[in-house]
Amino acid sequence: MSVSTPKDMNVKKSIEKNEENANATKDAENDNRSMSKVQSHFLVPSEKLDKVTRRVIAPYAQIERKGLKEEEAKEGRYLDMNRFNVFLEDTVDLDSLLYETAMVLKTITNSSGVFLYVVDDVRNEIILMPHNTKMPERHEVNIPIGEGKIAAAHAAATKEFLLIQDVQRDRRFSEGLKWIDAKVALCMPIVKPDGNCHAVLKLYRTNTESYDDSVVYTAVSVACWAGAAVHQAQARITLQKTAHLNNELRALLHSYFCDLASLDTMITDMLAVVKSFMGAMRSSFYILDRDNVVSGHLLADMWDDGWHAEKTTMPKKKTKVNLNQDQTPAGLVARTGQALNVRDAYKDTRFVKEIDPTTGTVVRSCLVSPIKDKHGVIGIVQLTNKSNARPFSVEDEMIFEVFVSYCSLIVHFYNMQHQKIYHQNLNDVYNELMSLHLNPCRHVFEELMETNGIVLPPNNFKSYDYHISEGSKEDMPGLVCFMYMETFADRNFDRSRIANFCLTVLSCYRNNPYHNAEHAFCFTHTLYLVLTSNPGCFDYVETAALMLAGLCHDIDHPGFNNNFLALCKHPLSQMYRSSILENHHFYLAKKIIEDKNILGKLPLVDRERILEEMQYNILCTDLAVYFQIRAHLTPLVGEHSFDWADNAHRKMVKGILMTTSDLSGCCKPFGVAKTIAENVYEEFYSQGDKERAMGYTPLSMMDRRRSINQPAEQIQFLSVVVLPCVLLLQTVFPNTSPLTDNCRKTQDAWREEIEIRGQRLWRQDDSLGNLSRSRYSTKSRSDLT
């Protein structure tokens, strides 16, 4: 029986998780495919689906347009970290390892003794490594690296082994081997794969027997192995330190990004971690203030963790420091943007003062790195003075880079937060300004309130044939208030607030050919007729939400559809993923309702529910949403399984009701319907002209050059979109049959329009034919007609 190891279990869990994700993705794709099939088959025969339906719904559905496309982002492959194990867990003492290697090599080569020198790159010295000494610093022997004089220093400089057959007579090294009376010597440098010399082994014999080629070969082999081992061990130690630092910093960042810690506390904790981790005495963090440049001064916010002996958790922040004030390492990095490793500040002529004026620290050595964005340096991180009084090494620089990368996230997030706060305040200022200008004209408001906020409707107001063009457009606010009072606003609503609200909303509609205040009134009027003719179907909150949504459903419409906004990368398309304009309409409606406080007398529960219902209702005016609702509601009605008690069924009916009211202009008498269609085409052609100027091919309904196709396109639109919608509503509310009748009459009228145009074209051709037969004959206009 096999036994599963923890590693196997982790790999198994990872594979199972990937399989589950893959299966979930496949299920989602299948669901999407099935949904698309359901949504595609409306009430149109399948053989006409491609030719008619796609062409008609093209201006409203989300489709792919001709033109330049952005490159799709390639998804990265999933990386399961559980497949990897820790490379090596235990650290090693490199000095002890090298000393043991030297002693083994001494025995193998029959040497009288061996010395081990460790290279100090910073000081350019080799240091004799004592063994079994409790305080090696007091017994340290330093020898400058250079050719000549001393053999071990010569080998460290040349990085080549050195065989001395007769030490006493070799004139290259005037000081011999130092401290010993040897006859033969072999100096072997231990060179790492990166080309740096780490140590030097010096074997010697007190007798005159020379080292033969086999001994030299053995020593070279051992030195090569030792160089590779040292390199691997150092890399592993650096990797372990980096991983440990990663874990600590990730934990701190998680607390910060989850709003569990303030910026000051988080930066102070990170500075304390890196200071302790790298053995530094002081750590500092600067965030440059690029927006506050005064007379060339480079100002920055500075966080300083202080000395390692200070035991306090209080964040230390110096509000502002001037990095241009003195020649400091941080100031130099801020100006040049180059990382800096000062190994000996006393010998560096770039810094004239021993004490850093920004931190008050005596600087012996420091490690400074900039944090950059595309505009330049935005922050600086500095470590000052190692506890062991040595300068920062190359390995320290590698580990420091990890810390700097996390600091980069902090600075970017810090600046982003400041930008967020700034734009929030700016948004509040603009909102206040917009609220001021949203107030209607005082004279118009007072004139409306003279009739108690309403205008008595005409006699045919309760007919689906009525349109505001028959009366005065100035009566629209009063008529809307009348409809509100008739449906929901007779209680719990203040008439003056309702009048103010209606005037404000109607004034927020732009002067578009179609999507204007008249369209909003026509929409609301149709809703009013359906709701008053079918009382009790919807409760008070639903009725109020429908009527309010009807008036606000196209507020601030720009005259272009969602596809165009996405095509030209309008700011609204960057705010909302779908139903771009509909979400914008609801946002403005909500703001006006809150500013006017028209729901102030209602309980909080009803207020929240009205806004929620309004959002759904307005989003249903997106024809892309309508097609989905129709595909689900049609089978329910056809199978007689529709249930008013089912909230989901009620929501679908409200969605169809909103779409019917939106399209009700097509269900007016033909004279009105034709004028409305011409206004729609005027908006479409304006959008098509802009698309053509942008290098795209306009859709047929938006191409001004194809205006001859208007009647045929209207017949198709009525057949595919409008008639199925009003028929579906008529099934639920039979008394809405006048909408269906007018829709069919409008279809017939457009067919007559096509026949009339066709006859005219035929008679013109016939006349041209007669002219061709008799080149010089002429006919009067009465003959041609």
Image: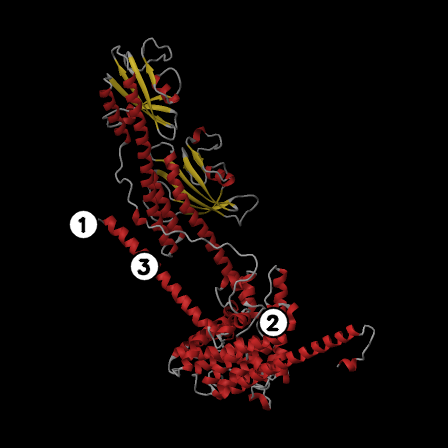
Q: Position of residue 689 (x, y in %)?
A: 64, 65
Provide the residue designation for mark 2: 510
Quarter of the C terminus within the rendering: bottom right
Question: Label 1 amino acid?
Answer: Ser
Question: Label 2 amino acid?
Answer: Arg
Q: Position of residue 167 (x, y in %)?
A: 32, 11
Image quadrant where residue 148 sits = top left
Q: Position of residue 169 (x, y in %)?
A: 34, 8
Pick the residue in front: 620 or 493. 620
SS at circle 3? helix
For the residue carrying disc 2, how many other residues have a C-alpha within 10 Å: few (<14), some (14-19), or many (20+)?
some
Q: Residue at x 47, y 33 (%)?
A: 351
Q: Give the numbered dot on residue 2.
A: 1
Q: Residue furthest right?
A: 776
Earlier along the polypeptide chain: callout 1 or callout 2? 1
Q: Residue furthest bottom?
A: 459
